[in-house]
Image (tube, rainbow, N blue to C red):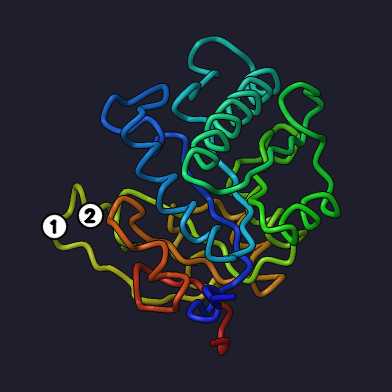
């Protein structure tokens, strides 16, 4: 049997995707060329044997429910449902590229996927399939960034890979400030102190508590996902002070 996993530094991961990434240039909904490109990259590392959990946001389907006159709790429930829609879609595209994938949900939607438990997620990962966890944390007032940090800790992930439109974390918006400085690495404490917006403070705090590094990278650059997993200096790594 060919060993395809030994080339990777990280072998058990949590991949955090934004809903907007699935929308591509159309801005909302699911753009087939964009989701196919992402799914092809992810399917390759799954087929190589990387134990993979995935959390996807829902911003391509609904964002800012409060601005539409909807209060926070029902608005967050709508957002949770949006993440389940994206999870189902992404699972289907992964399968089309030869990777096995199962959807678990943190809210009870029996026909959309099994109800999430850490034990069931780990069982799926050990079988060689990806587990896509929809429904956020299952509770209002928490973002999918926090859900990603929580699910990574629960499933024993070595690292969170947060895919973004830019090639790492900057001290200001690189789209607005051409002089923005990119960090090659930064600690969780520094990220919190600088109020960097790449993840919310609850997610950063949870990762710091459980010593989970976060790699922020540009997904839509071909090969970047595999390079991150191999430990190449792609994007920005957020880690605990003194850790490797």
Q: Secondary structure at mark 2?
A: loop
The residue wearing badge 1 is: 178
Residue 237 place in picture, x, y as percent? 45, 72
Please tell me in which quadrant of the rendered image residue 111 appears. top right
Instruction: Name the residue at the left extreme.
Output: 178
Residue 124 place in picture, x, y as percent? 75, 52
Q: Quadrant of the C terminus?
A: bottom right
Please tell me in which quadrant of the rendered image residue 47 appears. bottom right
Seen from the viewer's position, the closer of residues 224 and 185 is 224
Q: Quadrant of the N terminus?
A: bottom right
Assess disc 1: are there few (<14), some (14-19) or many (≥20) residues with their C-alpha within 10 Å of its C-alpha. Answer: few
- Direction from residue 109 to residue 189 in the image, left or right: left
Residue at the spot 60% in from the left edge and 12% down from the top edge:
70
Residue 218 place in picture, x, y as percent? 33, 56
| Above or below, 50 relative to 89 | below
| Above or below, 164 relative to 23 | below
Residue at the spot 48% in from the left edge and 25% down from the top edge:
63
| Above or below, 11 relative to 38 | below
- Direction from residue 112 to residue 232 in the image, left or right: left
The residue wearing badge 2 is: 174
Seen from the viewer's position, the closer of residues 12 and 212 is 12
Q: Are marks 2 and 1 in contact (CB under 8 Å)?
A: yes
């Amino acid at each position: 049997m060919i060993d395809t996993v030994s080339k990777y530094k990280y072998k058990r991961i949590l991949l955090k995707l934004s809903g907007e990434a699935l929308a591509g240039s159309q801005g909302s909904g699911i753009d087939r060329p964009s989701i196919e490109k992402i799914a092809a990259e992810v399917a390759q590392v799954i087929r190589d044997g990387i134990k993979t959990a995935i959390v996807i946001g829902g911003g391509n389907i609904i964002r800012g429910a409060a601005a539409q006159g909807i209060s926070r709790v029902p608005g967050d429930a709508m957002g949770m449902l949006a993440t389940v829609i994206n999870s189902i879609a992404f699972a289907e595209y992964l399968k089309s590229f030869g990777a096995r994938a199962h959807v678990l949900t943190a809210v009870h939607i029996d026909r959309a996927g099994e109800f999430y438990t850490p034990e069931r997620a780990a069982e799926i990962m050990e079988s060689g399939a990806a587990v896509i966890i929809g429904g956020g944390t299952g509770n209002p007032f928490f973002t999918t960034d926090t859900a990603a940090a929580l699910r990574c800790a629960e499933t024993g992930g070595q690292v969170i890979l947060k895919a973004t439109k830019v090639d790492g974390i900057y001290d200001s918006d690189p789209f607005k400030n051409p002089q923005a400085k990119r960090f090659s690495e930064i600690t969780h404490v520094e990220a919190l102190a600088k109020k960097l917006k790449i993840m919310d403070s609850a997610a950063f705090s949870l990762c710091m508590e459980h010593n989970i590094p976060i790699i922020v990278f540009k997904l839509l650059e071909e090969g970047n996902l595999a390079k991150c997993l191999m430990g190449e200096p792609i994007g920005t790594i957020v880690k605990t002070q003194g850790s490797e």
